[in-house]
Amino acid sequence: MSLTLQLRCRCAAISSCCWEGSQTWLLGPAIQAEYEKLGWPASPSDNPSLWEGLSWARNANRIPFPVLAQMSDDEYLSGLEALTALRRAGKPVDLYVFPDEHHVKRQPAHRVAIYRRAIDWFNFWLLDKLPVGGSQAAQEAERWQQMRRSWNQREAKPGG
């Protein structure tokens, strides 16, 4: 997501995350070589202006919305730099990792969980509605309420 679009968002649900310089190293030399063929920088230190406008990690304080990340076990590592930076900046971030999945989640139970959680996430952040139904929904409601309290306290402080 381009940072120029971020002002239009009040919350986000993503299934893969973020363009960061470290990805070329995390994803391995074959992917790095393919990215380089497309003109992607070979190193995070190459083309710093690209990363200044693209990187969530480098712009964590500017991301003004909660982020739900529901990622496969073969992609979540590439999102940890950004998601960790967002958490360190006090942003509400919830990460779920789905085992034995890839970019497009194929297992029916995982797809149902992803859809349900995304709807609950949007209802919570946009409509102030708590998730209902079962112990997992109760745990999410409790965790998200704590995220909201922490975020509101941080945002209320000068310079927050």
Image (cartoon, grey):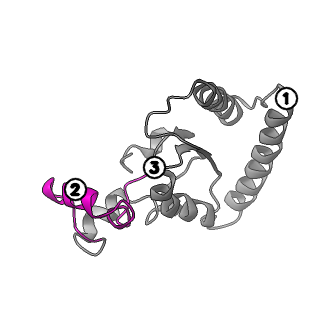
Which residues make up the magenta segment?
A: 18-43
Q: Amino acid at mark 1?
A: Gly
Which residue was labeled with disc 2?
35
Mark 2 crowdedness (10 Å alpha carbons): few <14, some 14-19, many ≥20 = some
Q: Nearer the viewer, residue 149 or 72?
A: 72
Q: Position of residue 27 (x, y in %)?
A: 36, 59
Which residue was labeled with disc 1?
134
Residue positioned 35% across, 67% down in the render: 25
Q: Quadrant of the C terminus?
A: bottom right
Task: Report, in whole angstroms, how far the alpha carbon at label 2 lies from the one at label 3.
Answer: 16 Å
Report the side of 156 relative to 47 (left or right).
right
Q: Position of residue 153 (x, y in %)?
A: 75, 58
Report the side of 110 relative to 150 (left or right).
left
Q: Nearer the viewer, residue 45 or 112?
A: 112
- Please say if 124 is above or below 145: above
Q: Quadrant of the N terminus?
A: top left
Instruction: Please report whichever mark, 1 or 3, sits nearer to the chain's N-terminal start.
Output: 3
Which residue was labeled with disc 3?
17
Task: Report, in whole angstroms, how far the alpha carbon at label 2 lies from the one at label 1.
Answer: 44 Å
Residue positioned 39% across, 51% down in the render: 3
Residue 29 within the magenta-colored segment of the rendering: yes
Which quadrant would residue 128 be assigned to in this image?
Answer: top right
